[in-house]
Amino acid sequence: MLSTIGDLGEFGLIARMTARFPHTDDVILGPGDDAAIVRAPDRRVVATTDMLVEGRHFRRDWSGPRDIGHKAAAQNFADIAAMGARPTALLLGFAAPAGLPVSWAEEFAEGLRAECALVGATVAGGDTVRSDSITLAITALGDLQGVSAVRRDGARPGDVVAVIGDLGLSAAGLALFLADSTVGHPECRAAHRRPAPPYAAGPAAAELGATAMLDVSDGLVQDLGHIAAASRVRVELQSSALLVPAVLSDAVRTLTRLGAIECAPVDLMLAGGEDHALAATFPEGTVLPPGWTVIGRVAEGEGVVVDGAPSDARGWDHFSVTS
Amino acid sequence: MLSTIGDLGEFGLIARMTARFPHTDDVILGPGDDAAIVRAPDRRVVATTDMLVEGRHFRRDWSGPRDIGHKAAAQNFADIAAMGARPTALLLGFAAPAGLPVSWAEEFAEGLRAECALVGATVAGGDTVRSDSITLAITALGDLQGVSAVRRDGARPGDVVAVIGDLGLSAAGLALFLADSTVGHPECRAAHRRPAPPYAAGPAAAELGATAMLDVSDGLVQDLGHIAAASRVRVELQSSALLVPAVLSDAVRTLTRLGAIECAPVDLMLAGGEDHALAATFPEGTVLPPGWTVIGRVAEGEGVVVDGAPSDARGWDHFSVTS
């Protein structure tokens, strides 16, 4: 029995994984050739890459292989959605030790497949190599369906700022894992393992005329800072506009009791990353569909201001020495 | 002075690297947003991903950062060319330790830039993360310019088999490094550090009606085995048709004297990988442009036959336990 990917060999591993990925109309040529061929109906393709490193972006004792497959796809599809596009395909770079169980790779592929299915995409190609620890490199492609891409530099004074999707739940889940808390708060743990970005809201926001948009990967305040900088405007937030979910309040109570954090639930919503909510600016008067919450306004100036005070809430800098 | 990428921080590192990458017409939106937007003029995009792991695909004592940048781009652009397409853009996943010198990252980016310039492409986006060793994930995109993609499954009995580009030089260079030989044979060492795929020959072969094509990454015989399998044909090679470069003969003499290898130069041409030559099949009678060498013929049957005998020359299986 071939129980590790080293036993299976490169081509065997590729065959096992690709067998799970269905054909879709967007993928003209899938895995097995030098490169994939993907439809780009409006003569443009949206493309983004993320890397996930074991021990840094995921831990095998906290997340199962399916979770990791879901999350790896989700964070890339969120980037596609944040441009206003529909994800069409995904390429997988899979670096792993030869001793990795075949079942791990298969379950991971199953997670990728399932997250792809949520948006109608599939895995179109990739590469497998050996390495000492698991490193995943995901590239997602997307289709703008004829709309103008929503960049970060289009926010204008007077626009409203709105968000859709979870905020703070993933950070609370991570804090629970870090605190060695092993029971309770399943919603926060699940949000950390498998974020649930509001994919369809991205293209819908583009259709509605969103002037700037991004996905919240590092923290709401930090990420809105990118819109402020790129658009040369000030983003003014009202923290009271953020609706704190009961599951987040409960988790923060536990974390406070454990001495793991010292902050209010709303602080996690402002600073916590990895939920991959979408944050966008819209012209004043835009009627937003259900799910969006208006949390502020764009003004002349620079930076992000929370409740009238410049915020120094910091997100996650991947190379900072202290992180 | 900020001497390591950890000192510089993620956004500083990204700024330093992206400053080197020029704008091109194919890239509608480059680095700095959630995703890049790349032109796909004929409503299809060709996409491929490769990962390079330090210690496995490159060694910092054998190759400098510019070499590694060149090679990382080259092996992906060769995949694009092997479909018959023109490379348009590249996405970079860059995982590295915080202690990596900033200069290393900058020189690496310069190598990427220079290889991109050879084909008119540029770096359109990417991701930087921290990891214990350097792992590179490169995704290349390409434009088929209206031609039919050249896949691996179109070879037909009667077709001629031809190659263009270096064969065996990279393998000889690698063998020299592995044998701790520190002088001589600069062409082979250079070929290992910076392969020189014949990019333009890919789209030209597609225009000429190539029936199957791939880039030689694992070894000529092994890779032609993929065409044989996908096309359900037999590939018959004449090793005497391969023109052995003097620099390869010289290197093999040195390697034999060192006891590092026991084979003829032509064996390295048949089995050595990583030169990223292009191998293709064409209908009989096709007038091939300069640079192509006819090395065999497609017949009914299966597998690859060299000089009349089934070949068991083996390439590189990334997960095999003995490799």
Image: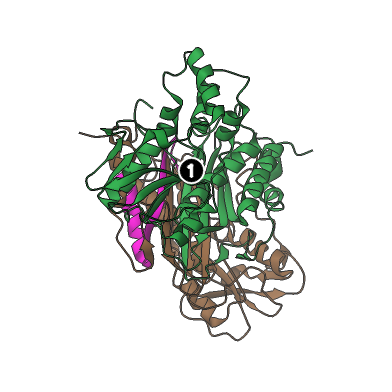
Chain colours: A brown, B green
Q: Nearer the viewer, residue A241 or A151?
A: A151
Residue B98 in view: no
Q: Residue at x 71, y 51 (%)?
A: B20
Q: Residue at x 24, y 34 (%)?
A: A2
Q: Residue at x 34, y 48 (%)?
A: A108
Is residue A171 magenta-colored?
A: no
Seen in the image, is B312 located left or right of residue A237?
Answer: left
Tell me the magenta residue range: A106-135
Percent position of residue A140, x then y: 47, 59
Q: Quadrant of the N terminus of chain A?
A: top left
Q: Residue at x 30, y 52 (%)?
A: B158
| Residue B156 versus residue A143 in the image, above or below | above
Per the image, the residue denoted by label 1 is B277
Q: Quadrant of the C terminus of chain A?
A: top right
Does dot 1 land on a helix, a strand or a loop?
loop
| Residue A213 figure quarter | bottom right
Indicate the amino acid at tag 1: Ala
| Residue B316 figure quarter | top left
Q: Nearer the viewer, residue A59 or B289?
A: B289
| Residue A19 versus residue B60 in the image, above or below | below
Seen in the image, is B227 located left or right of residue A153?
Answer: left
Q: Nearer the viewer, residue B244 or A306?
A: B244
Residue A293 in view: yes
Determine the chain carrying the residue at label 1.
B
Percent position of residue A255, x then y: 49, 48
Q: Nearer the viewer, residue B91 or B228?
A: B228
Is residue A130 magenta-colored?
A: yes
